[in-house]
Image (spheres, rainbow, N blue to C red):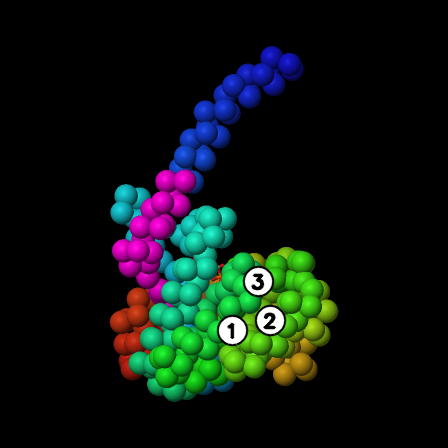
Amino acid sequence: AKDGGRGRLHFYAPDLHSRAEERSRLEQDLRDAIAGNALELYYQPVVSTATEKIAGFEALLRWNHPVTGWMSPAKFIPIAEESGLIGLIGEWAIRTACADLARWPTDVRCAVNVSPLQFANPELPTIVSKALESAGVDPARLELEITESVFLNSDEDTDAMFAALKNVGVRLALDDFGTGYSSLGYLQKAPFDKIKIDQSFVRGATEEGSRNGAIIAAITSLAQALGMDTTAEGVETLDELDMVRMFGCSHIQGYIYERPLDAATATDRLRTGLTA
Ligand code: C2E
Ligand code: CA
Ligand code: CA
Ligand code: CA
């Protein structure tokens, strides 16, 4: 066993080293990408259950890496967060989404994801209001998506940030609801306009004996009672679509309607409508 232990250590050492190297290489590439405008925002339609029309979009980062090609934000956002680059990237995303919102009809909204690290920056409300102002966009058309992790070390600064953002006039959405440390206290404390039901609840909810349907129904009626919208995320099949409609989700987002689109195609979809 001792030998095995030593063997493992010996075996893993170069691996760890190269992973650290890959990370710092990626970090440098990410800096270059920001400087060289190589990041893009894609927009996934969010569809109103009532009208079956596009109510808005969620902005999702895309990076076409010079060597490895398209890289998932699930891979590079954590690097951006650890290296502190998320501040720059996040501000760029807010400004870009506002500029695109200015070119869309005024009843179309756009949601932007906000990392907990951005949320901890006291400058965030100013960054947001300046972006809206310079694009000439009504704050009520911008929605900030925040995950439950902002509550992990919540204190009076967290409360103040929520108040300051509401004061700017943007909408707030609680993202990935139900996946982390969900507490009803968050819904009581923070002024959310929308709950986004994580796709892990949608997935498999149509299967016999699944508890997910009951959970979706409960979240939706709770949201309704509190005057909040609900978006079902990751709806892929017709069965899933029927189910989340039946349970009263006010909005639907997923491949069943559309994948994330580049800005030009998203703008086009507003004119042509959805084909699903
Ligand atoms: P998220 O905020 O939960 O975004 C939803 C993810 O689900 C997106 O993945 C979207 O492409 C994917 N999705 C949408 N519909 C479907 C579906 O029907 N089926 C399946 N399987 N997936 C679907 P994406 O674009 O890869 O983004 C991953 C995560 O990266 C996001 O999860 C978010 O946490 C983060 N992210 C993306 N853009 C940003 C950003 O600008 N800022 C920050 N801080 N995080 C971002
Ligand atoms: Ca999101
Ligand atoms: Ca989500
Ligand atoms: Ca997620």
Residue 182 horizontal/vertical position (percent): 67, 62
Lower position in the chain sequence, tag 1 or tag 3: 3
Q: Give the class, few, some or many, for how many residues have Cα within 10 Å of label 1's Cα (few <14, many ≥20).
A: many
Q: Are marks 1 and 3 in contact (CB under 8 Å)?
A: no
Q: Give the class, few, some or many, for how many residues have Cα within 10 Å of label 2's Cα (few <14, many ≥20).
A: some
Three-letter amino acid code at disc 1? Pro
Q: Residue at x 64, y 14 (%)?
A: 2
Lower position in the chain sequence, tag 2 or tag 1: 1
Report the residue that reaches farthest toward the top.
Answer: 3
* Camera-side residue of 203 and 21: 21
**77 displayed left or right of 195:** left
**83 displayed left or right of 101:** right
Residue 202 among magenta residues = no
Q: What is the distance, in whole Å, between disc 2 and disc 1 at their CAs?
A: 8 Å
- Residue 151 seen anywhere in this rendered image of the structure: yes
Q: Are marks 2 and 1 in contact (CB under 8 Å)?
A: yes
Residue 23 horizontal/vertical position (percent): 42, 40
**170 displayed left or right of 53:** right
116 up-or-down from 135: above or below: above
201 up-or-down from 127: above or below: above
Q: Residue at x 48, y 74 (%)?
A: 126
Q: Quadrant of residue 205?
A: bottom right
Provide the residue designation for mark 2.
161
Which numbered circle lies on residue 120? Answer: 3
Provide the residue designation for mark 1.
125
Q: What is the distance, in whole Å, between disc 1 and disc 3 at their CAs?
A: 11 Å
Q: Secondary structure at mark 1?
A: helix
* Camera-side residue of 150 and 214: 150
